[in-house]
Image (cartoon, grey):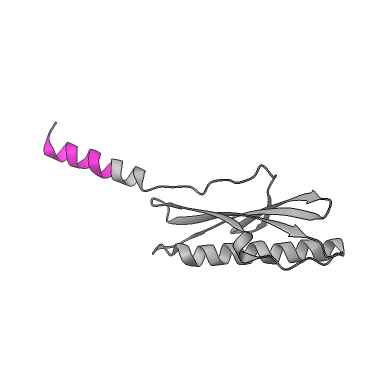
Amino acid sequence: MSSKRLLIVLIITFMLSSCATAVRQTDITMSSYDKDTMYGVKEKDDGFVIAIEYSRYQFYPESDAVAIACKSQLTSIAWEYAERKGRKIEPLNDQRIRISMGRNGFSGITSCQATGIVKFIK
């Protein structure tokens, strides 16, 4: 194999290995919230489980910014959902939100999957 072909194969291999997707943490059916966010809710006796998929384009990867926005979306949607139900919820503990991050180097999309358990106030 010529050195030029070897270089092309190595570049393609590197680019393919640089893609990673966020790990889905639940089997909750998702609905569209906005252009960057999908969400799903699973009712429980004392509250609900909320899951979101958040992704956006970034020319320069800033996973921390996406993680913060992802957690913020999860919290905001949880409060909105509880309000529509006419219920109050306990504040979500940021440390209890499970999060998974990924990035597609080809498209420049950084993605996040987050799940949290929300409890109603009695």
| Residue 62 x/y as whole percent | 43, 65
| Residue 24 x/y as whole percent | 58, 45
28 vs 58: above or below: above
- In the drawing, does residue 111 fall left or right of residue 97? left
- In the drawing, does residue 67 fall left or right of residue 77? left
- In the drawing, does residue 72 fall left or right of residue 120? left
Which residue: 18% across, 37% down? Answer: 5
Residue 39 versus residue 82: which sits nearer the camera?
A: 82
Which residue: 80% across, 63% down? Answer: 82
Membership of 62 in magenta stretch: no
Membership of 6 in magenta stretch: yes
Magenta residues? Answer: 2-12
Q: How many marks do you count on the picture?
A: 0
Q: What secondary structure is the stretch in magenta mostly built from?
A: helix
- In the drawing, does residue 63 fall left or right of residue 53? left
| Residue 79 x/y as whole percent | 75, 66
Which residue: 46% across, 62% down? Answer: 63
Quarter in which the N terminus is drawn: top left
